[in-house]
Image: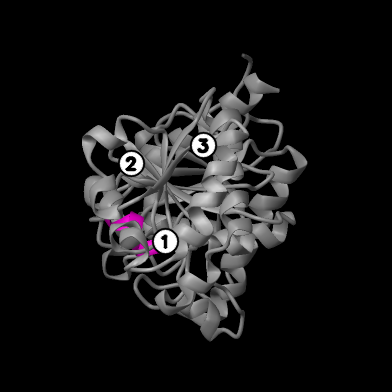
Amino acid sequence: MGIAPVLAVTSGEPAGIGPDLCLQLAQQAPEQPLVVLADRGLLRQRAALLGLDVMLHDYIPQQTASPPHGHLRVLHVPLARPARPGKLNPANSPYVLELLGRAAQGCLSGEFAGMVTAPVHKGIINDAGIPFTGHTEFLAGRTHASQVVMMLAGGGMRVALATTHLALREVPDAISAELLESVLRIIRRDLMRRFGIAHPRILVAGLNPHAGEGGYLGREEIDIMVPLLDSLRAQGLDVSAPLPADTLFTPKRLAQCDCVLAMYHDQGLPVLKHASFGHGVNVTLGLPIIRTSVDHGTALELAGTGNADAGSLLEAIRVAADMARCERMAS
């Protein structure tokens, strides 16, 4: 197989736990070669605060071997202002986006095999006057992806979302046959090429309680979902009829699928996060690049305390490496 290409790890919000987690990678020594995108001085300061003995090395693109235990390869991106643990500063919001932009650029050019993202703080980026709804939407714009899908993996399941960061009252109007077909085709394609699943099986949650109860609790299932799903099955896609979400996430059901498609954020993710929080992985499907992320936020109150758990970041690195390997084997 040769040397595994390098993964880019963005350190995220500098006042949060992202830098702490990235420093822990030097102690964990993942097998996958990687480079951390961060301000070098920030990492040094945070390592001193945490009492971690970490040797930082400048990133050199031609070097792909993993550094030894206690060492970390760093691609330096300068902060706009000094960062303090737990203290948000909107002046550093462009820095946070520069981390993402540089990693995405490297993935598009083939410099990186994929990117893994530590958490960012959406609110402070918007406070800086920069419209930002999340990693998923930002990377879709940077890579010119026409449609992307958020999927979380953990606890023995994969859950994808038809809609993401959308107010609940707006969800029914967003559910259309066109959207669902696009989302289901993206899920199927990426499960095949990046997860090595030859014939993906997808269970689809209904939008309404009891999947509409025959139209008495809503007609989206009857008018939109059933005709589309019947058509896709006729074309060879292994997709279920709309299923009641309250009984979908049972062991027997989950054993029959490779992914669940939920209609909205809080329909599917609470179940997965209950089963895997702190060790789950957020995967963006539909991008021309590989991107995974942690399943948690910036945890400002834990920054600089030494109490942050790198489990989700390590799992995100493992999943990204596996996805890259599957893609190489498929090409």
Cα separation, mark 2 vs mark 3, equals 14 Å
Cα separation, mark 2 vs mark 1, equals 33 Å
Residue 21 percent location from the top left of the image: 38, 51
Magenta span: 264-270
| Residue 110 lies in quadrant | top right
Quick check: can you spot residue 204?
yes
* Residue type of the residue flagged with mark 3: Ala
Question: Where, quadrant-wise, is the C terminus in this rendering?
Answer: top right
Horizontal side of residue 100 vs 270, given as left or right: right
Which residue bears the numbered disc 3?
320
Element type where label 3 sits in the image: helix
Residue at left offset 22%, top offset 35%: 251
Q: Is residue 114 magenta?
A: no
Residue 103 percent location from the top left of the image: 64, 51
From what the image shows, is residue 236 above or below residue 280?
Answer: above
* Residue type of the residue flagged with mark 1: Gln
Closer to the camera, 255 or 32? 255
Tell me the number on the disc at residue 45: 1
Which residue bears the numbered disc 2?
154
Residue at left offset 38%, top offset 40%: 314
